[in-house]
Image (cartoon, helix red, strand yellow):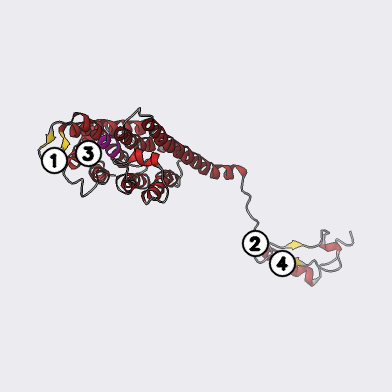
Amino acid sequence: MALLSRPLTPSHSFLRRNVHKYTTAIHVSPHPHWLLPNPPVLLRFRRPVSFPPHIPRSSLTSATAPLLQDAGATAAVLAGAYSLVLTFDTLNHRNLIQQSLSRKLVHILSGLLFAACWPIFSTSTQARYFASVVPLVNCLRLIVHGFSLVTDEGLIKSVTREGNPQELLRGPLYYVLILIFCALAFWRESPTGVISLAMMCGGDGVADIIGRRFGSMKLPYNQHKSWAGSISMFICGFLISIGMLYYYSALGYFQLDWTWTFQRVALVALVATVVESLPITEIVDDNITVPLVSMVVSMLSFGY
């Protein structure tokens, strides 16, 4: 009690009056300062001490899950694309299907199946870049074989008209470049990419098959095109486009007014069919004109 009743020294009084200024101060000694002969030494932190934040394991898992999903989807689509070409090459090698029909079936199915596989990729921003790796690999493959750096008779027979490797650097190369562009520019966010691929792959591909078999009546302004081919392009391009739009709408990517959509898709199919029928194939390939005009008309019609 005598210790407690001892009067405060000047140093103690100074500390008592100014202790509120040291809100971040800590005592070095764990004992009460009134039991010590000298006042305690106060340490003041001039800047806050920060420690590295703890990253939960769930956050790491959620960050890597989209990457793993996109990588797996890319590998699966690549394997599917290779298997498709290999299948038709085998059928052609066994004389079960003609080379011209094999080439057009690859033309029709490759792009449509590629677009149909977009939903298996994640919702992350890098998903479209992973998807574009598939046609990019095929693009590099066409360039290597087109310059005859590597020989692959199966690939040449499957996608060329006359078996000339240099043909790979024209129509087939334009084809995969359009696939890359649609994946990067439109992805699952706009009907334009889906409709353009449907017209290039489905419409133009079916037109060639039907035109060769039933194309006895030629167009008056182009003797290399037929009424049967043009009509089939319009009908098949329209139906395949509607089917792809319905597929994406069912998955929740598009919200469409179907009466309005039917009219717009019919307009796109009509314009693409007219452009495909023009005698300009020797100047500009159909794999360029058909998808590009489909993109322009579709963007003007749908607004995005």
- Queried whether the magenta region covers residue 202, the answer comes back as yes
Label 1 vs 3, first from the N-terminus: 1
Q: Residue furthest left?
A: 220
For the point 11% across and 41% down, the residue is 221
Q: Are marks 1 and 4 in contact (CB under 8 Å)?
A: no
Magenta stretch, overall SS: helix
In the rendered image, which quarter contains the N terminus?
A: bottom right
In the rendered image, which quarter contains the C terminus?
A: top left
- The span shown in magenta is 199-205
Report the residue marked by disc 1: 222
Disc 3 is placed on an element classified as helix
Report the residue marked by disc 3: 268
Label 2 vs 3, first from the N-terminus: 2
Q: Callout 1: few (<14), some (14-19), or many (20+) C-alpha neighbours within 10 Å? A: few
For the point 62% across and 45% down, the residue is 56
Real-space CA distance between mark 4 and mark 2, rounded to the nearest whole angstrom = 25 Å
Which one is in front in this view, the residue at disc 4 or the one at disc 3?
Answer: 3
Label 1 vs 2, first from the N-terminus: 2
Real-space CA distance between mark 4 and mark 3, rounded to the nearest whole angstrom = 84 Å
